[in-house]
Amino acid sequence: MTSVQDNIQGKVAIVTGASSGLGESTARHLAARGAKVVLAARRTDRLDKVVAEIREAGGEAIAVATDVAKRGDLEKLAAATVEAFGRIDVLVNNAGVMPLSPLDKLKVDEWDRTIDVNIKGVLYGIAAVLPRMQAQGSGHIVNVASIAGLKVFTPIGTVYSATKHAVRAISEGLRVEVGNSGVRVTSVSPGAVDSELKLGSSDAESAAGLKAFYDANQIPADSVARAIVYAVEQPANVDINEVVLRPVSQEF
């Protein structure tokens, strides 16, 4: 009988936004379970440190400098993964930004960046791995959304919420489109999690309110990592479509 442990052992997993927070924790958890992990982010110094620690612990990992807002970077990431490990079994689309502010502050450049990273970055990741997964008849795409994709985070997170609603819509549409090809799709929607995401607001008032909210509620990043591992470890014919998790104390 195959154990769930065997369903991660030897799999090749890409994790974007892996230089800190949820991405770093997810990469470490997958590596500890025997996955060959490709860590992708812009901060290569941080990536190299995590890769070294994974290898010291007996795991297999490489780092690839990646800006998910650039489609070419995602194509290079997929190619580097195949060159190093021969295939791609899992993509964790985790990279994200959260520069919160009310719409009337008109931080249009931040809106653009949020859309580029949170929506286009997810789509570019899918475009880079989906043909390979369909060709091999298996694969798993995990998209990190947010509880802000379940309810609009007003009055400071309207654009962020819009992007995370989009991630959930993309995930569900993709699930329906590719299920018969053996590719699984999971959307993970966390609440307040301790990571650098909460530090993204340039609007002082929004940043202060967000800090107080997180200080009162946040749970560790490995809470989300364990949820992702749970979805990945399921048998190939089981697809955990959606996971929603939040601190017990969080109302929103």
Image (tube, grey):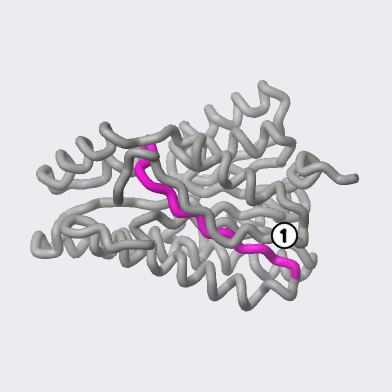
The residue drawn where x is 77% and y is 62% is: 237
Number of residues whose C-alpha sits closer than 10 Å to that of mark 1, classed few (under 14), some (14–19) or many (20 or more): few
Q: Residue furthest top?
A: 56
Residue 160 coordinates in the image, percent (x, y): 30, 59
Q: Residue furthest right?
A: 1
Q: Which residues are magenta?
A: 182-195
The residue drawn where x is 29% and y is 42% is: 198
The residue drawn where x is 61% and y is 35% is: 29
Q: Is residue 43 above or below residue 125?
A: above
Do we see residue 88 in this rendering?
yes
Residue 35 coordinates in the image, percent (x, y): 71, 40
Do we see residue 74 in this rendering?
no
Q: Is residue 220 above or below residue 57?
A: below
Between 162 and 201, the one nearer to me in the picture: 162
Residue 41 coordinates in the image, percent (x, y): 48, 45
Q: Is residue 35 above or below residue 108?
A: above
Amino acid on which the number 1 mark rests in the picture: Val
Between 63 and 208, the one nearer to me in the picture: 208
Please indicate whether residue 152 sits to the left or right of residue 118 in the image: left
Q: Quadrant of residue 150?
A: bottom left
Please indicate whether residue 224 sits to the left or right of residue 205 in the image: right
Between 243 and 182, the one nearer to me in the picture: 243
Count up the numbered dots.
1
**Which image quarter holds the N terminus?**
top right
Q: Quadrant of residue 240?
A: bottom right
For label 1, the residue is 238
In the image, is residue 176 part of the stretch drawn in magenta?
Answer: no
Between 4 and 199, the one nearer to me in the picture: 4
Residue 182 coordinates in the image, percent (x, y): 75, 68
